[in-house]
Image (cartoon, rainbow, N blue to C red):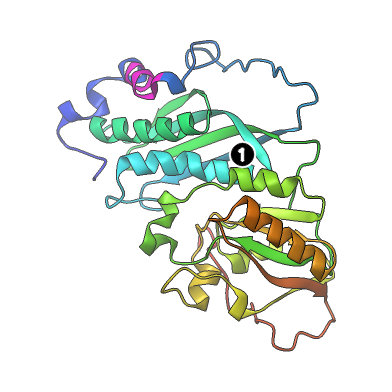
């Protein structure tokens, strides 16, 4: 569905900012609490957490941009869902749970009202599913384009926050789900953020580092590799979506699966995998290799040099 129209009566230009804000409140419904905890002031006021010993706060932001993250082939309701899901995946990658969000939109005045309504309703549906109050945001003019950005506040599920920097040589490398073909399959907007899975992994002391795969495994993996180490992966172990070749599995991006490292013996890694399959029988977990010292032999290992993943601005 094309988001713009030259018929002014069908567009946001027919309303102006204040009337549009009133419609947005209605479209979001129960997903938006009343002011000051929701839209209506200079800042949203978040209620104090009643939980004693609550974990560290987490904050992330991600956009969806017309012509980059979606086009006319993607339903606006799916675009709204994708905006929140991308941010939820970041919270999942640190083993946290979401708490509240604000949404900022930069809109061409020709943006269609029915497109925007469906966008907000898709956003609200996923927000209600994950109990994420949408507490405010901002609107601005962007002639010739459409950009929606969401900032999500979350909190670690325990005292430990899983980051990208905890791995060391000797750790195993594992990934959830399957990789590749995200655009052709629609996975890039239909995916399920691995929130429960991320919290489960964060509670396992043998998990040393984690991130979500958004720009392709070949690129994102390097964020986990410490100085003086290198990844030793094997192509036959990579879990691929049906019809995907090795290049697609490594570089397509927007997989939104969890990539993490596991410390310990092979038996310990196998035990984690067995426990995972008991906890999440519908979500595959695959150990795809190991981190090794930089000068260790890598006979038979996958050469990642030709694979680069998605790079912004290129």
Residue 185 quadrant: bottom left
Q: Residues within 10 Å of mark 1 (few under 14, many from 20)?
A: some
Is residue 307 at all visible to an observer of this figure?
yes
Residue 102, x across and y down, in percent: 52, 28
Q: Horizontal and vertical percent for residue 61?
A: 57, 39
Q: Which residue is mark 1?
A: 60
Left or right of 242 in this view: 41? right
Q: Secondary structure at mark 1?
A: strand
Count of marks, rendered view:
1
In the rendering, at what x and y percent does residue 238 appear? 59, 73
**Residue at horizontal 49 percent and vertical 39 percent from the top:** 84
Q: Nearer the viewer, residue 266 or 247?
A: 266
In this image, 262 relative to 136: left or right? right
Above or below 279: residue 300:
below
Is 184 one of the magenta-colored residues?
A: no
Above/below status of 286 relative to 1: below
- The residue shown at (38%, 57%) is 186
Q: Position of residue 150 (x, y in %)?
A: 51, 35
Q: Quadrant of the N terminus?
A: top left
Task: Tell me the magenta residue range.
Answer: 22-29
Residue 27 included in the magenta stretch of the image: yes
Relative horizontal placement of residue 44, taking residue 205 as reference (left or right): left
Given residues 88 and 59, the one toward you in this image is 88
Residue 110 in sight: no
């Amino acid at each position: 569905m094309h988001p713009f129209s030259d018929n002014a009566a069908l567009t946001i230009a027919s309303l102006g900012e204040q009337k549009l804000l009133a419609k947005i409140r209605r479209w979001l419904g129960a997903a938006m609490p009343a002011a000051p905890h929701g839209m209506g002031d200079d800042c949203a006021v978040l209620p104090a957490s009643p939980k004693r010993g609550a974990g560290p706060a987490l904050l992330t932001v991600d956009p969806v941009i017309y012509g980059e993250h979606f086009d006319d082939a993607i339903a606006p309701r799916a675009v709204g869902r994708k905006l929140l899901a991308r941010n939820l995946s970041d919270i999942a990658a640190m083993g946290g749970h979401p708490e509240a969000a604000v949404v900022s939109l930069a809109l061409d005045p020709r943006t269609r009202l029915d497109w925007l309504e469906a966008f907000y309703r898709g956003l609200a549906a996923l927000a209600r599913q994950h109990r994420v109050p949408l507490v405010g945001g901002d609107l601005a003019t962007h002639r010739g384009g459409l950009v929606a950005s969401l900032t999500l506040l979350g909190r670690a599920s325990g005292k430990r926050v899983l980051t990208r920097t905890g791995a060391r040589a000797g750790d195993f490398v594992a990934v959830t789900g399957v990789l590749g073909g995200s655009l052709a399959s629609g996975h890039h907007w239909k995916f399920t953020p691995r929130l429960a899975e991320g919290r489960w992994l964060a509670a396992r002391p043998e998990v040393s580092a984690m991130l979500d795969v958004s720009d392709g495994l070949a690129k994102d993996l390097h964020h986990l590799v410490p100085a003086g180490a290198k990844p030793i992966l094997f192509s036959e172990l990579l879990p691929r979506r049906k019809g995907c070749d090795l290049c697609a599995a490594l570089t397509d991006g927007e997989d939104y699966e969890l990539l993490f490292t596991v410390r310990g013996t092979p038996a310990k890694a196998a035990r984690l995998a067995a426990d995972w399959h008991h906890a999440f029988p519908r979500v595959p977990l695959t150990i795809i290799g190991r981190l090794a010292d930089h000068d260790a032999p890598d006979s038979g290992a996958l050469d990642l040099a030709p694979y680069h993943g998605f790079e912004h601005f290129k």
